[in-house]
Image (spheres, grey):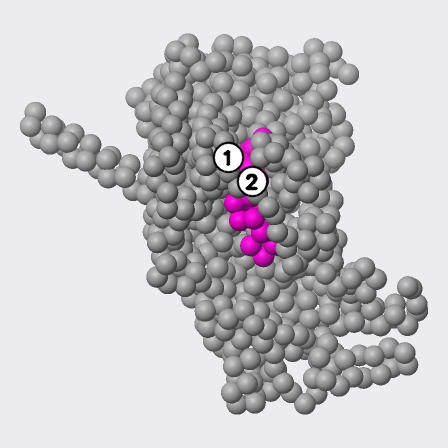
Amino acid sequence: MFSLDLFLNALAAGVLLGGFYAAVSLGIAVSFGLLDIANLAHPVFVMFGAYLVYTMNSRFGMDPILAGVLFTPLFFVLGALLYQLYYASFERKGAESLRGLVFFFGILFIVEVGLLLQFGVDYRLVEARYIGESLHLGPVGLPFRLLIPCVAGVSLTALLYLFLSRTFYGRAIQGVAQDAFALRLMGANPFKVKRLAFALASATASVAGALLIMIGPVEPAMNREYIGRAFAVTVLGGMGSIGGTLVAALMLGVAESLTATFYGPAWGVAVSFGVLLLALAVRPSGLFGR
Amino acid sequence: MSQRAFLAVAALVVVAGFLVSRVLTNQYYYFAAYVILQYVVLATAWNILGGYTGYVNFGTPAFFALGAYTSVVLIKMMNAPLGLQLVGGAAVAGLLGLGIGYLTLRLRGVFFSIATLALAVVLQTLFVNWEYTGGARGLSLIRPATAPLFGHYVQFLFEVMLILALFAVGVAAWIEHSWIGRGLAAIRDNEEAAECMGVPTLRLKLVATTVSGALMGLAGAPFPYFVTFVEPGSVFDLNYAVNSLAMPMIGGSTTWVGPIIGAVLLGTAQQVATVTISSALNLLIVGVILVAFVILAPEGIVGLIQRLARRREGDVRLAHGKAT
Amino acid sequence: MTSGAFLDVQQVTKRFGGFQALSAVSLSIRQGERFGLIGPNGSGKTTLINCISGTLRADGGRIVFAGQDVTTLPAHRRTRLGIARSFQIPKPFVSMTVLDNLLIPLEYSGHERTDGAVEHAMSILTLVGLAPKARVRSGALTQIEMRKLELARAMAAGPKLLVSDEAMAGLSASEVDDILAILFELNQRGITIIMIEHIMRAVMRFSERIAVLDAGEKIAEGQPDAILADPRVERAYLGE
């Protein structure tokens, strides 16, 4: 049954979801889009972040967003260490393609099973006073559990955008994607720049995890749905363009939300895969590609 | 190994399998052996694309499950015999391989890998929503109680999987030593150079994805009769994705021997371990071993043995040099 | 169409996003000719030979080889027609021995893997001086050996036209002479050769004719001494 109210609500929910997808995809947009490292483990880090937030929330009643922000230094360090290991084992030897992928897949697997051992397969969720409430604009309801993640996701995107375009290190990160040699002339060490970029990308996982568990209950295997989504967004957004990532995330959110509303919620994930395949088949450089 | 020698050994193994099934009656052994042999097929299939060609497939569960569900459909529709299930499962999964390859293999290998990862998730959604095959709840199947010559049907299935494993290994070994395998190795080493040296890279990659996918489907086709209850959660198990790539990577991914070594070692270890530790912990160990091998011994056990042999050869030569 | 042209590049253009890598470049090369292609870094030389060998597809224009339009053929088909190339950065099949590296193009140009094929490959290796290394893994070669392997492997494809992409960069003077001698020898055997090179001494000595690319356009073409005397060429290399 098509009705305008239903459509508008689905559209609004899609936009809100899209803002959150941007937060999850940022890490991939930087690591894969700019550094050319297919970090398949990023979504499982988001998962890990969600469970840390869950622990802080259920034990101490801490606000989920606050917990997410508090854990960013931990994820920053984890990201730096992971890149160091990746660099020493694969990138330096020029063997990144096959074995690097398997490596990240192995990490994904270890973290996922680790979460499974610690928290089990039951769905976990967080509590905060504002989560159940909604903002009403005419016929359209904007639930806070979606609105806050969207605002936070868009803010995170904006912050990263400013960092990449306005600061020396940000420009160095964008430079390393284009020309490592020119970067060396600028007096920056490509390895350190890449490590910083990878660490930053990983740090976003903590915040994204807080947003994820705010939207709905989580279980460890969920990260796999987000691999397809995040890579679809990154490819569609033009491989490393932060603005493009946001636009692509919003588009994917709307497409999924409309599909879920009119064809059933189970088909939402299928949309992201369809979009990914389409993007790869038709326009590998993305809709907003260089 | 020559073709004739391989066929002779294969025939011997099949006969031995049959004879064992006349003597050994404890059902547990057949279940365990079936699972290990199934891994031999999956690991061998994965390796044709991953090890020979250098394209990582994370979507083993998708191909395996498609093989299993094709059997389910064939059983429900026409009560098809096992032989037809095998052919059907292999054909449908092979077509999936061809399709996904056609869409993504023009691009860099990373994109293929990501597409296969997403493929498993989406196919699972599809089957969760398809009521005909039981949807999310799953579907019970009644398998024949006995098979002629074998008595118990599980013993028969064990022998079938034994033959499938030999078949898969035979296909892999043939490819490895044919012009196709040499072309695939050239692609793995440097795709651009391969193309410029006259290797039709796209066509060979499509052959590899199709054959690899078909063999994975073949491994899944007898699964419904093996477990008699099929549900999306069990056939799309991430388990298959991890093991099918961990086994060749650990055993050694450039020869057909590697996946067998990996599958037998890792498969047996897991069968033994599930008795004592939880299956999750079990998987965690597989993950850690995989990462350790990828970093420390990228050529796998076969590579380690070759390196040892070469060093010994070198020592011998050195000793000779000193003597003269 | 110019009659008698063995390789006819007509108005070929190529762009990457907003970057115009080649704008309407035309070349006409005779059979058996030694042709030099020079230009500053980023002038489009490698893009042009990628379009000729087929690893890139031209956006516009036509490429005709031995009377056949090859503009849209994939690279492996062009190799079978007789266009072979070496790579600026050597791209050996590292897991294979030097000999097996040569057997790949031989096998894929229709030679069965027989003793005859091995003999043929060995004769090419002897020509370039790699015969003693035939059973060595190609990943273990030195720089100069890898350059020679690049040429030998391209030879194994049985080319009528060989495109040599900076085969001498970073080599010592005597090594440059080694490679030059090999290329002269191949030309003697009737193979048309396009040489892309930064080492002026080598290009000038080797080429019968030279074309100069700058910023994706052909700015000069002619005999070596005429090219050297051309003020446009000097400007392209030295700036205003």
Instruction: Give the class, few, some or many, for how many residues have Cα within 10 Å of label 1's Cα (few <14, many ≥20).
Output: few
The residue positioned 68% from the left and 43% from the top of the image is: B76
Q: Are marks 1 and 2 on the same chain?
A: yes
Q: Which residues are magenta?
A: B207-234
The alpha-carbon separation of the residues under discs 1 and 2 comes to 7 Å
The residue positioned 52% from the left and 78% from the top of the image is: A52
Residue C51 seen: yes
A45 versus A61 height, above or below: above
User: Is residue B232 a member of the stretch shown in magenta?
Assistant: yes
Say if mark 1 contacts mark 2, CB within 8 Å: yes
In which chain is the residue bearing label 2? B
Q: Amino acid at mark 1?
A: Ala
The residue that label 1 is drawn on is B147
The quadrant of the picture occupied by the N terminus of chain C is top right
Give the farthest residue toward the left: B323
Q: Amino acid at mark 2?
A: Pro
Q: Position of residue C225 (x, y in %)?
A: 57, 23
The residue that label 2 is drawn on is B144
Instruction: Give the class, few, some or many, for how many residues have Cα within 10 Å of label 2's Cα (few <14, many ≥20).
Output: few
Q: Secondary structure at mark 2?
A: loop
The quarter of the picture where residue B203 lies is top right
Question: Is A231 displayed left or right of B18 in the figure?
Answer: right
